[in-house]
Image (cartoon, grey):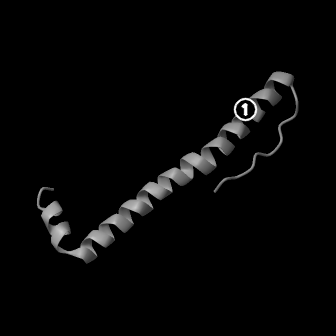
Amino acid sequence: MMELIPYLKTHAWATLAFVTVLGLVIGSFLNVVIYRLPKMLNNEWQCQCRELLALPEEPSEKLT
């Protein structure tokens, strides 16, 4: 791991590739947290409320 930092300092293309891949990984994680998690929680809360009120189940929205 320690050899990676000097290598990235001397090779600009490797630095660009590393930063791009890191950005894609972080962006993918944030997509799940920011976009999908609130929708999943909302669907779960609606299901729990229907059970509490003894209402019939509605098909849940698919997020995939």
Quarter the C terminus occupies: bottom right
Q: In which quarter of the image is residue 49?
A: top right
In the displayed orientation, state which residue is furthest to the right. 55
Is residue 24 left or right of 44 when viewed as pictured? left
62 up-or-down from 23: above or below: above
Is residue 55 left or right of 7 when viewed as pictured? right
Image point 75% across, 28% down: which residue?
A: 48
Tell me the crowding category of disc 1: few under 14, some 14 to 19, or many 20 or more residues within 10 angstroms, Cα based: few
> Does dot 1 land on a helix, a strand or a loop?
helix
| Nearest the eye: 51 or 38 | 38
Give the residue at mark 1: 45
| Nearest the eye: 35 or 45 | 35
Is residue 55 left or right of 48 when viewed as pictured? right
In the displayed orientation, state which residue is furthest to the bottom. 13
18 up-or-down from 35: above or below: below
Image point 87% across, 34% down: which residue?
A: 56
Residue 63 in percent (x, y) is at: 66, 53
Q: Quadrant of residue 37?
A: top right
Residue 54 in percent (x, y) is at: 86, 25
Is residue 3 left or right of 64 when viewed as pictured? left
Q: Quadrant of residue 7?
A: bottom left
Image point 20% across, 67% down: which residue?
A: 8
| Nearest the eye: 46 or 6 | 6
31 up-or-down from 54: above or below: below
Quarter the N terminus occupies: bottom left
Residue 38 in percent (x, y) is at: 65, 42
Residue 59 in percent (x, y) is at: 80, 46
